[in-house]
Structure formats: C-alpha cells, structure tokens
Image: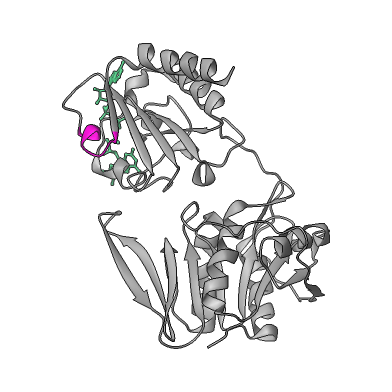
Amino acid sequence: MEKKVLVLAEIREGEIRNVSFEAIAAAKKVANGGEVVGLLLGERVSHLTKELIQHGADRVITVEDRNLNVYTTDAYLQAIIQVIDYEKPEGFILGHTAIGKDVSPRIAAKLKTGLISDAVSVEVVGEEVLFTRPIYSGKAFEKKIVQEGIVFATIRPNNIQPLDKEPSRTGHVTSIAVDIKDLRTIVKDIVRKTTSGIDLSEAKVIVSGGRGVKNAEGFKPLQELANVLGGAVGASRGACDADYCDYSMQIGQTGKVVTPDLYIACGISGAIQHVAGMSNSKVIIAINKDPEAPIFSIADYGIVGDLFEVVPMLTEEIKNLKV
Ligand code: FAD
C-alpha cells in the first residue's frame, strides 16, 4: 500500500544534516511509491526546500516560526503534532539524534502510537514494513514489524544510504502556520564544546582516545590524525572521567553511539560499555600497547605499540599519500 511519509529535516548551522537525507531514503521505502514529505521548522528556511527535493522529497512543508529557530522540546512537539494532525501521514521518520531521541517518544505518547527507535535498516516485505534495530548494546539485532497505526521510527545516523542528489528534481512547497504557546524553556545561547566542527554521530572517520592518552595534551596527535583524515575526535569515558577531554566526546553506552566507516581506538582497553557505542563501525583499528587488550578482539586491524609513536607515524604516512 502506498503511504504518505513525513520526514523531519534537522538543520544545524544553517544546513540540513546528512541524517535527514538518510531519513528521506528510509521514508521512500516506507512510502512504497507514495509521497515523501520533508518538514522544515524555523524562520527563513525556504532556501533549504530545494535540497530536500533534490534528495528525494516529493513535497516540503515549511513551518516558519521564530520559536523554532533552535530546538526546544515544547516548541518542536507542538509544531510537529499540529503538522501531523493537519497532514495525517501514514509514516513519520526522523534521525536518532539528540533531537530525535528527545521529541519522538513524546510524539508517540501524544499520538498514542508505537515508536521504533534507532533503526539501522528498513525494508518492505509484502504489505509489511520491517525495521532492524540493535539490542543488548549492539550484540544482537531484532526485526520489528509495524502492524497498525502510523509507521513511526528514528533511524541511526550513517546506516542508511541517502539517495543520489538529483539537481533536476522538482516538488511542491507548502507552508503551514502553527500555534506555539506556553514554552517552558528559552534557549539564550549555544556554546559548542566539541574539538572539531564535525558531528561525532555523523562523522565518517573517528579517532578516539582513552586513558592511554595520559592527559589533555595527549589528544593533540589524535586531533592531527583526525584532521588529515577529515574526521572527528572521540573519547572513552575513562578519558572523560580523567578530565582529559569534554564529556561531549564520550562514545559508548552512556555516551554517543557512532557508526563511522573508520574508527581508530587509541589507548582504549575496549570495555563492554565503550564497545556498545562503536562496535558497528565498518572498520575498526585499535592501537594499544597491551597485546591482551580486549579491544583487539573486535578490531579489524590491531597495532600493538605506543600510541605516541604509532599515531604520528600514521599521520605522516597519510599526509604523504595525499601529496
Ligand atoms: P582503560 O581501561 O584504563 O584503558 C586504557 C588503555 O590504554 C589500556 O588498554 C592500556 O594498555 C592502553 N595504553 C596505555 N598507555 C598507552 C600508550 N602509550 N599507547 C597505547 N596504549 C596505551 N566507558 C566508555 O568508554 N563509554 C561509556 O559510555 C561508558 N559507560 C559506562 C557506563 C557504566 C554504567 C559503567 C559502569 C561504565 C561505563 N564506562 C564507559 C566505563 C568503562 O567500563 C571503562 O572504564 C572505560 O571505557 C575505560 O576507558 P579506557 O579504555 O580509556 O581506560
């Protein structure tokens, strides 16, 4: 059956996040030939509609309201619920991002419907939509079928291939007015703490440091390696707890869950709670001076050695490859 599927397009620093293009690709499957509708929230967003259409949206809804310029739970929840009431989509897909994780359960509760969170793939089998999602900290995968109500899911960044951009694609743009009131929070300022501009959850390459980096200075060679690879720097909780870096860099069960193409773990032992956040990376390289470190059991490539020798060598080699 064809479905109308809504996709929340997340905007960060004036640009649509890649996960939203991945959500469009997922929505295309769910729609099964039906309409995929992008949703843009915030003032002066109309210049972004074209990009959503080029990435596969058939139509885009803009909701221009100054209360939606930065994310707050109340404002987004009210706006999205009003759009859903008006549009009555049969599906709604958004990224499993900080915003997606915060707003989606509240939407599900308001709509009295189920939610499939953190899906890594979607397929349509006959009349049924089948989502795959990791369970037990990524040790196993379960398949979920939506049998009734709206097909509502968040998708994990970096798992579903976005559609190729088609510059010639066209689509309609509709504008919807919403009534946002009784906001309990107002964002006055946003202070970024991450070391590079690349969002960890969307980074294709992550160089991560653990307690083995010894101190905050020890992250410098990792940052240099990340720079030559065009990647971001992450950390274990061990490194965060020791105050070598900020908690916004923490990867793992109680940190960020990442699935880059390449994850380089430097001076990280490979505790189960860390592995929970990075084991689905496509290629894992571990650098550790202890040959018995558990991280080697999940690594595709292991380098037994001192990270302060190995990491600068890698950086130099990669620089040489590029010239
Ligand atoms: P360590 O275990 O101390 O390992 C340091 C490693 O560095 C060692 O293997 C050592 O051989 C190596 N090393 C030292 N010097 C060098 C060198 N010069 N060159 C190369 N290698 C070197 N952890 C997370 O990471 N993320 C989480 O989200 C998380 N959530 C948790 C939730 C709970 C409820 C609990 C209880 C724990 C959680 N932890 C989490 C903590 C986790 O159990 C580990 O304590 C932590 O991951 C260890 O960090 P580490 O690997 O950096 O440190």
Could you say which quadrant of the image residue 103 lies in? Answer: bottom right
In this view of the protein, can residue 291 be seen by the observer? Answer: yes
Q: Position of residue 69 (x, y in %)?
A: 74, 57
The C terminus: image quadrant:
top right
> Within the magenta stretch, is there residue 297?
yes
Q: Position of residue 180 (x, y in %)?
A: 73, 72
Residue at horizontal 42%, vertical 37%? 262
Answer above or below: position of 230 versus 114.
above
Q: Give the range drawn in magenta.
A: 294-300
Q: How many tags in the picture?
A: 0
Residue at horizontal 36%, vertical 46%? 277
Ligand 1 resides in the quarter of the picture at top left
Query: Front-most of 100 and 280?
Result: 280
Q: Residue furthest left?
A: 292
> Within the magenta stretch, is there residue 2?
no
Query: Front-most of 139 and 28?
Result: 28
Could you say which quadrant of the image residue 275 lies in? Answer: top left
For residue 79, side relative to residue 97 (left or right):
right
Q: Where is residue 133 in the image (x, y as percent from the top left)?
A: 36, 64
Answer above or below: position of 204 versus 91.
above
Residue at horizontal 59%, vertical 80%? 33
Query: Front-most of 81 and 39?
Result: 39
Q: Position of residue 6 (x, y in %)?
A: 62, 74
Answer above or below: position of 272 versus 314.
below
For residue 278, side relative to residue 84 (left or right):
left
Answer above or below: position of 72 versus 13.
below
